[in-house]
Amino acid sequence: MSSSHMALYRSVWRWHFYAGIFVAPFMLILAVTGAIYLFNDEINDALHADKRFAVAEGAPVPLSRVAQGALAAFPGGTVTRIDTPTAPGRTYQVFVTPSEGEPVRVFVDPANGHALGSYVYPKTFIGIADLLHGSLLMGDFGDGIVELAACWGIILTVTGLYLWWPRGQVRLHRVLFPQFGRQGRSFWKSLHASMGFWSAFLILFLIFSGLPWATIWGDLFRQATKAAGIGYPDSVRAHGAPVSTSQTVGDVVGKAMAPWTVEGMPAPQSDPHAGHHAGGPKSEATGHAAIGLDEVERIIAAQEMRDPYRLSFPKDATGVYSAFTYPDQPEGQRTLYLDQYTGKVIGDVAFRDYGIAAKAAELGVQIHMGNYFGRLNQIVMLVPCIGIVVLAITGPYMWWQRRPKGAFGAPKAVSPTSMRAVALIVLALGLLFPLAGASLVVVLAGDWMAGKVLGRVAYST
């Protein structure tokens, strides 16, 4: 290897080392929680069978009785959403905000409208895994950390592939498979390298397919695809209904409660003045008549939207009923918006209305979650999760083994010229991912300042 290539190799190794040390704990959390969530239905069925499976037999009761059954368990509460059964023999899932305490999910038997039980989702096993995966249980701040770790995970994977690439006269099997005949650090290095190769591309897919849900990168991606005309559809405006200038569908129904594509759309609005002549109950917010829940169910059925669908209730006087199907295969996605006073369909968005980027994002999300191809999809997505766990453990372990006593043990710094070259390469990646780019500037500045202040740092050879 020439001196210039050696310098580049050591530079890439240095950045791979730093990225691995700081990102490994977060990648480990994401991998474990992601693996758990891949099998969320199976786990929930095992842990909450008494709630998720119906007991009574017979035709389903109207939605109004489903809501009444949930509120009978929480008097004074408010229903915000109803998920219809995902299959025969399953229960309704009713989202209730009690008069006191945290929001709950109440499970109602479809045949008699009786509540079979409830839970606070963030306190369940799957709920904790879900929230850890998305925000580390730290809200928007944690969401930013997850996004940062994911972006650096891309850099970590790309640099790892560069370091793995065979050089010179190396037998292929020695770099494709772990060398079980070796001992000590040599074995762990071969395991780390081979596992990285076999899982790298699936890891990259997991990261890229998950980034649309990230706060900063997802919003930038949504805006960019909207500007290019390949993102969320404008078809909701074609029905002549007013739309909010400040709220999106995600703001109205809740983040991650609707398909990613429609989450960023301007929220359609009901017309309070249209309810003067309607015959339903009065809205407390406006005093105008609003349609009943059974009428909403009838309209949805007339629009040929079948179970399962998720029905979100209006949040205020201008809010709408939004019903959407969210099947494992996104080609079946459809979202309806109904005026809460007249029942008029003021929005009807289907998968065919999405731009090409939005279609790709929805497809990626369903594969990411292990839904699209059924059990095979779950198993395939489990592979990179296992790969990340192995890499996140073996990488730091090798560093600990080779670390000189009393020293940090980072790879030796190289010349400023080489450092500038590799910094430009990594910075190019960072420009695609704002949080990674900003953190890279901080790391570069810290590395430079450490050299200036300390004069020298103990590096291993």
Image (spheres, helix red, strand yellow):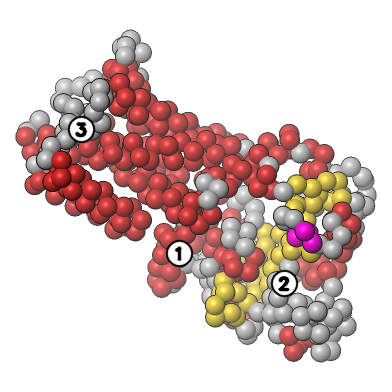
Residue 237, placed above or below residue 372: below
Q: Amino acid at mark 1?
A: Asp
Find disc 3 in the rendering and name its residue: 411
Q: Disc 1 to disc 3, how far (Cα)?
A: 36 Å
Residue 373 appearing in the image: no
Q: Are marks 1 and 3 in contact (CB under 8 Å)?
A: no
Specify the label residue 219 is tagged with: 1
The quadrant the N terminus occupies is top left
Task: For marks 2 and 1, give the CA distance.
Answer: 24 Å
Would you call the spot at circle 3 few (<14 residues within 10 Å), some (14-19), or many (20 or more)? many
Circle 2 SS class: loop
Q: Amino acid at mark 2?
A: Pro
Whether residue 300 sits left or right of residue 194 in the image: it is: right
Q: Residue at x 23, y 48 (%)?
A: 446
* Dot 2 alpha-carbon crowd within 10 angstroms: few under 14, some 14 to 19, many 20 or more: many
Q: Which residues are magenta?
A: 95-100
* Disc 2: which residue: 314
Outermost residue, left direction? 3
What x and y, as percent, mark residue 245?
Answer: 54, 80
The secondary element bearing badge 1 is classed as helix
Of 299 and 79, nearer the camera is 79
Image coordinates of residue 302 in percent, x first then y, are 79, 69
Given this view, does label 1 or label 3 mark the residue nearer the observer?
A: 3
Name the kind of residue labelled 3 in the image: Pro
| Residue 19 appears in the picture as rendered | yes
